[in-house]
Amino acid sequence: MSKITRDQITGMNFHYKHYPLEYFLDAMVQYECKKIELWGASPHFYVDELTLSEMRKIKREIDRRDLSVVCFTPEQCVYPINLAAKEERIRERSIQYFLKSAEAAKELGAPLLLVTPGWGYENEDSQEAWKRTRDSLEKLADVAARLELTLALEPLTRVESNIICDAKSLKKMLEEVNSPSLKGMIDTIPMALANEDFNDYFNLLKDEIVHIHFIDGKPEGHLVWGDGVLPLQTYVDQLSQHGYQGALTLEYTSYQYVQDPDQAMERTLDVLSGVLSD
């Protein structure tokens, strides 16, 4: 059984959004997070605003601190990005946004680019939205293959999407796209809201899971460990049993942490110190 270690804990800049990017990078060094997941949004790293030279300058700042970007996650859960959009102009704009994001991921040295399925209208045939997402992912997977990137497809909560919200629908989409450049990932909040756990995902998808957002919840919310009700010890035990060796990203999207993001990190690491191996 492979132990889950402290080195797998990965910092993310979402709850540092009210601080400069350099502040976040320095904090990751302070808290001994060797890996980061970069959330691509203004003012830190919005792909539609940055020139190639600006991206490379940010990469140098990351390198100077001996940090590595394990995943690039462009903002995509709010307007106007939707890979399943019925309107062709919106869907095409969304695809182009991800193509730019793929180039950015390559510049950052990130092996993974996170993608989400989008959503279809609630009053249309759900299969039509499913097909639009599949077609979009097929196009993106072809580009990812050329760039030697892997797309990490994240299920969302049912409030966010009516396309992929659980392990079974994730498996179905991966099978239909059928590309080695498209894999699955897990966020503990949609997982818990679907009444699933890591066993459900790994028993079904095995090594198709390449990335995890590892946060507490009630079960909704993206909370610091200890602020929610999710079974931390059980989750760590399950991940150990399945031999997961990838990143465990602390994705804190709740606004209660943006004023004092360092405190959120400190409380998290204190809780995790009791369940992780060195």
Image (tube, rainbow, N blue to C red):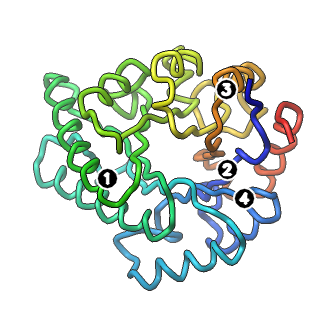
- Nearer mark to the viewer, of 1 and 4: 1
Q: Which residue is mark 1?
A: 145
For the point 81% across and 58% down, the residue is: 31
Dot 3, how many residues are within 10 Å of its Cα: few (below 14), some (14-19), or many (20+)?
some
Q: Which mark is residue 10?
A: 2
Residue 180's quadrant in the figure? top left
Q: Which residue is mark 3?
A: 239
Judging from the image, what secondary structure is the residue with disc 1 in? helix
Q: Which residue is mark 4?
A: 34
Mark 4 or mark 2, earlier in chain: 2
For the point 35% across and 44% down, the residue is: 181
Q: Position of residue 183 (x, y in %)?
A: 41, 37
Mark 3 or mark 1, earlier in chain: 1
**Left or right of 173 on screen, residue 106:** right
Mark 1 or mark 2, earlier in chain: 2
Q: Position of residue 273 (x, y in %)?
A: 87, 39
Residue 134's quadrant in the figure? top left
Quadrant in which the N terminus is drawn = top right
Give me the C-alpha separation between circle 1 and circle 2: 25 Å
For the point 67% across and 50% down, the residue is: 10
Mark 4 and mark 2 in contact? Answer it, CB < 8 Å. no
Mark 1 and mark 2 in contact? Answer it, CB < 8 Å. no
Mark 4 or mark 3, earlier in chain: 4
Judging from the image, what secondary structure is the residue with disc 4 in? loop
Dot 1, how many residues are within 10 Å of its Cα: few (below 14), some (14-19), or many (20+)?
some
Quadrant in which the C terminus is drawn = top right
Dot 2, how many residues are within 10 Å of its Cα: few (below 14), some (14-19), or many (20+)?
many
Give me the C-alpha separation between circle 4 and circle 3: 20 Å
